[in-house]
Amino acid sequence: MRPMTTITDTPTRVSAVEVDAISKVFGEGAGTVTAIDGMSVSVGEHEFLSIVGASGCGKSTLLSLVAGLDRPTTGSVDTAGHKVAMMFQEAALFPWLTVGANIEVPMKVNGVPRARRRERVAELLELVRLTGFARKRPHELSGGMRQRVAMARALAQDADVLLMDEPFGALDAMTRDILHDELERIWQERRLTVLFVTHNVREAVRLGDRVVLLSSRPGRVIDEFPVEGERPRRIDSALIAGQAAVITDRLRQEVSRHA
Amino acid sequence: MPDTDTRDRQVQGLDALELQPERGRRGAGEVARRVWSASWPKLAAVAVVLLAWQAVVWSGWRSEWVFPGPDRVLPVLFREVSTAEFWEAVGVTMRRALSGFALALVVGVLVGLAVAQVRPLRVAIGSLITGLQTMPSIVWFPFAMLLYGISESAIMFVIILGAAPSIAGGLVSGIDYVAPSLLRAGQVMGLRGVQRYRLLIVPAALPMFVGGLKQGWAFAWRSLMAGELLVIINQQNSIGWALSQARQLNDAERLLSYVIIVLIVGILIDVFFTWADRSLRRRWGLAAA
Ligand SMILES: Nc1ncnc2c1ncn2[C@@H]1O[C@H](COP(=O)(O)OP(=O)(O)OP(=O)(O)O)[C@@H](O)[C@H]1O
Ligand SMILES: [Mg+2]
């Protein structure tokens, strides 16, 4: 079957990530699971793309294919020479290292000299508003602060494409709202391209330039919604609520198909 | 959008609310109180044991020549402790313990790494390691004496067989139980090969590895004591040798004072491992401070 949707953005925009007709099948023989089948997405340079879909529709699988952690069964993923970093619901900081040392890890991998690493840590901590926390340990921080450290660590990879798999899923609403502002600011300051996976449709609309809706089993793109409204947006504004309602209806329609 | 200043304040306010309030520095009085509350139960226990011991002696269960009370043993112990031979004996025993343990450490780490990495090897000897851990190491002595004669090598051989499986086992489970989320984070950051081991696997496996070391030490110490009693190397002063000498001379006071020494060494080393384990866990955020 052909992919249902191929997304073309404004023609002038070059794409940073090009996912072309991929499928991903797990396992062999009778126990195979087709997680993704015929999915195509193209993400523009410096675009903020939100990805929503019901459980098990292959969102995490898609991100790990884009990150190059795994290979698609068929089709191709092209990141056009961009460096890709990834964040998860758990910050997954190394508990035996201080905050600063955690941020240094990807720089050690890239062979950045020590003095330069220190400078970068200070700069990244300032970016995520955690100046002065370099010597703390992860367990001394709150969940929201850990996610900000994880963000600093991801940026320490010098990545310009950031993949986020429900990064704020475990945070309380107030912290999440503030982190939305923070992410938006950093995305703009650093001119990142972001692929943001979430269950929360309002969050998707609050942050995204565009929201892509995936179907479940197998996962493929069934719809996409350009988001309207000047940034910065407020998650509790009527404009966001209205657009979210449309997407939620479409999502429910898709979910009930599986009843 | 709220301006930068307002947002800065919001973020800082939230951070401040979410952080645990800093605990104040402990004053000297506080420290003394903590030390006292940690140590008085132990002192009380020692007193109770000494009393019970003395009570048994007073009951006349055995003659005082065979079973002297603390009133006779403790002075001998203190006299013993001030002699050169005593320290020589302890020195020999501790040297054996440490070098045996160090050898077991090398063997255990090599075997553990191999088993953790090579799948067929794990299938082949994974359960053997567990089996060896359950074996009373004293069983190996006759064989060790056949192999090495009455020598220190025989003792070393048994120490290694006793301690290495625990050390290897601790390392293997440490590596097996590295949190998948950390492994994934490492993969995303591009950690590979030696760097992956140095920066991720080894530190993540450390708490369990220390657990294995602690258990390995317990086995090494037991094997060594058994070895020094069984493999009596002539004229080589050691704790085990002193124990058998004291028995042959029917010197019960000296015998019991060496038993006490063995107990004290065991406790000291255990305190050390417990401290290492606790401070690791605290740094990792695994235990309450
Ligand atoms: N390594 C794997 N082996 C077998 N099946 C897998 C594997 N990874 C994912 N799957 C299956 O592929 C499908 C998609 O999984 P994926 O984790 O990508 O979904 P998701 O959209 O991220 O779900 P969630 O919303 O719960 O995070 C699921 O049915 C899952 O069971
Ligand atoms: Mg997922």
Image: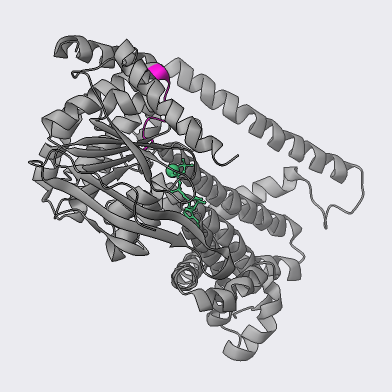
Q: Is residue B242 above or below residue B183?
A: below
Q: Is residue B91 above or below residue A228?
A: below
Q: Position of residue B147 (x, y in %)?
A: 60, 90
Q: Position of residue A240 (x, y in %)?
A: 32, 18
Q: Is residue A121 above or below residue B124?
A: above
Q: Residue at x 54, y 79 (%)?
A: B152
**How is this picture coloured?**
one colour
Q: Position of residue A65 (x, y in %)?
A: 32, 55
- Asked whether A238 or B153 is in front, the reply is A238
- Asked whether A169 or A33 is in front, the reply is A33
- Asked whether A5 or B256 is in front, the reply is A5
Query: How many tags in the picture?
Result: 0
Task: Give the overall secondary structure of the magenta segment.
Answer: loop
Q: Residue at x 83, y 58 (%)?
A: B66
Q: Residue at x 35, y 25 (%)?
A: A203
Q: Quadrant of the N terminus of chain B?
A: top left
Q: Is residue A171 magenta?
A: yes
Can residue A141 be seen in the rendering of this structure? no
Can residue B231 be seen in the rendering of this structure? yes
Decide if residue A60 is on the left or right side of residue B136: left
Q: Quadrant of residue A94?
A: top left
- Asked whether A164 or B92 is in front, the reply is A164
Decide if residue A208 is on the left or right side of residue B17: left
- Magenta-drawn segment: A165-173
Decide if residue B207 is on the left or right side of residue A140: right
Q: Position of residue A234 (x, y in %)?
A: 28, 14
Q: Is residue B90 magenta?
A: no
